Structures are given as C-alpha cells and as structure tokens.
Amino acid sequence: MDKFIDLRSDTVTKPTSAMRFAMLEAEVGDDVYGEDPTINRLERYAADIVGKQASLFVPTGTMGNQTAICVHTRPGQEIICDGRSHIVLYEMGGPAIFAACVTRTIATDDGLLDWGVIGSMIRGPSDHFQGTGLIALENSHNVAGGRVYPQENVADICDKAHAEGVPVHMDGARIFNAAAHLNITPAEIAAPVDSVMFCLSKGLGAPVGSMLAGSRSFIEQARRVRKGLGGGMRQAGVLAAAGLVALKESPAKIPADHANAQYLATSLANVPGIVIDPSIVETNILFLDCAQSGMEAFELSRRLREKGVLANAVSATRMRLVTHRDVSHEDCAVAVNFMRDILNARTI
C-alpha cells in the first residue's frame, strides 16, 4: 500500500522540508563541551518558551523525565504520581533503576491529581521510609485520553507541595497540546512547577529530541545526570536544528489536530457498536470501546490495516487513535467510513 493513514500515535510524524533543510545547514560543535551553537540556541529558546531559566536537550522524553527524577530525589524516596502515568507504565522502571526511588501511585478516572488525594500521601522521613521526594504530573495525560489539568489545579498542587518542601515535576511531553486546549502559553502552564519536560517530536513533528527545563542550578545538575545516562551528544546540532523549526512553526498547527480528534470522536460516536464520549476528548488523543460491536479491537485493528488505516488496539475492547500533522480531516473521514463499513459488514 502506497500510503497509510497512521492514527497510531503522534510519534510517527515525519520532519518537514523546512526541518530537513535546517538539519542540512546546521552549524555544529561538540555539545559535551558546550560548543554546539545550534543546541545552545535551542536550549535558550526552549527555556524562554516555557518560562524557565535554562533548558537541556535530551534524546528522548523518557530520559528527560528520568533525569529530572534523579536530580530532584534521593535514593529510597517516594514519587507521588498517577497510576497510569508515563513514568510508571512506559519508562522501563526507570525511577527504581536510575534514581533508586519508589512510586506511590494514585488511581484516577481522568489521570488528573488534586491536592485532596496528594496531601494525604505526603510523608517525611522516618525509621521506616525515606519520605516523599517528588510529585510528578503528566499534562496532557496520554493514557487518560489526552486530558488536560485545569491550571488552577496545577497551581494549588505546587503551592501546597512547596509548603511541604516537596518539588513538582511536569511530564509535559504534550504541553503544547495542553496549552492549545486551555488557550494559554506553555510558560503559563509551567510557571508553578520546578521542572518540565516536553517533546520536540509528537505534535511538534521534529524527528527526535525533547527538552528538560528548570532553574540554572537544576539544569547544571541535569547535564551531569544526562551524561551518566548516556545522553551526552557530540555534533547533535543537526537534530537541534529541526527542533528549533518545530518550536517556531508547529504550535500554530496543533489546534487543527484537536479539531480532527473531535471530528473523529463525534463521528465514531454515531457508528453502531462503538462507544466513545466526545465531551472528554480535549486534545489529540481518544479511546473508543468496541465491545458492543462483537468484534475484538485487535481484529478491528487488523482489518483497518488491510484498508490502509493504522490504529492501535490497547485491549480486547479498546482502541486508541491519535491525530497529528500528517493526518488530514479527509484522512479522518476515510478512517471513520472504513470502520463503519467493517462493523456494518459484520452485522449483515
């Protein structure tokens, strides 16, 4: 098949022509020596975007999150976070492996924490445990369907955490999606937290790379941790150049991704056998339930692939769809029609 409509994730976006040209022309140097001018520009620009003193270019969002955890915590301390957060489900047990920390998870329906549940779990060191070292928030929340924290909620958590002497890290892999939904800037979202990670890939469409931002002293420590995790790079300005283009050009395009996700959700809600609530689709991620269709999600995914649509089943009854720059409104309409056809054929 010449072209697939790829709704598996926004990680599949391809670099634009402008990004490829910037990579070709990038001025480079050795970043471990701090001599790559393109990376230095990216780090200054990214810090400004999220309103922090400094930032650090890392190969992946996972490395950015794990670096932050290592800087903020001491071995044995506890990290309070949502039970379905990325650092728990998809980072290879990193808090235990790299920071020697344990996660104290909270079960939520929408992935969003509040101080009412966090406050009761805060504890200082004692003869039995090392105490709370960090609170981690994910915004937007991947597995909860791209849900976004109300900003007053973030501010309240941070104010009360800081009063307890506990730092707050934000996994803002999709912070630009959160900002578009709230119609505020990424800097406003990140203002209350001590550190924030965001991806240059995903919705921004760069081929690789993420940014970790915080205070200057935090980033100085993070740079050393990054080296220990294997993230010290040399002439990586060829990657940073694409990231700069992504930061400057891509945020304006994210609302279209959200509109396409809402279109998918609204349209699929009218397909017999599909259950989805469009009112909770806030950004570019949606989950549907196909249990009532009589077809397992894995089989539905297989049949969609045969028609040129890629979508991931996450269980026997649930499927995840993600919109991004490389998927048009017309592509979404085609995907809906194929899904309707597949399910209708089963009932004939």
Image (cartoon, rainbow, N blue to C red):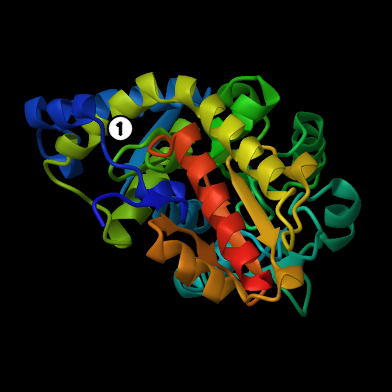
Dot 1: within a 10 Å radius of its alpha carbon, few (fewer than 14), some, or many (20 or more) residues? many
Q: In this view, which residue lies farthest toward the front?
A: 348
| Quarter in which the C terminus is drawn | bottom right
| Quarter in which the N terminus is drawn | bottom left
Q: Is residue 287 left or right of residue 49?
A: right
Q: Is residue 119 left or right of residue 194?
A: right
Q: Which residue is mark 1?
A: 243
Q: Residue at x 65, y 19 (%)?
A: 184
* Residue 144 can be seen in this image: yes
Q: Is residue 18 left or right of residue 320?
A: left
Question: From what the image shows, is residue 274 above or below residue 233?
Answer: below
Residue 199 in the image: x percent, y percent?
43, 42
Instruction: Between residue 346 and residue 150, name the one nearer to us.
Output: 346
Instruction: Between residue 249 and residue 6, name the one nearer to us.
Output: 6
Question: From what the image shows, is residue 7 above or below residue 185?
Answer: below
Instruction: Between residue 223 and residue 92, name the one nearer to us.
Output: 92
Q: Residue at x 44, y 26 (%)?
A: 47
Residue 240 in the image: x percent, y percent?
24, 34
Q: How many marks?
A: 1
Instruction: Between residue 50 and residue 281, name the one nearer to us.
Output: 281
Q: Is residue 229 left or right of residue 108?
A: left
Amino acid at the residue labelled 1 = Gly
Residue 232 in the image: x percent, y percent?
23, 51
Dividing the picture into quadrants, the one containing residue 178 is: top right
Q: Secondary structure at mark 1?
A: helix
Q: Residue at x 78, y 72 (%)?
A: 126
Question: From what the image shows, is residue 205 above or below residue 123?
Answer: above
Residue 88 in the image: x percent, y percent?
59, 67
Dividing the picture into quadrants, the one containing residue 130 is: bottom right
* Residue 147 can be seen in this image: no
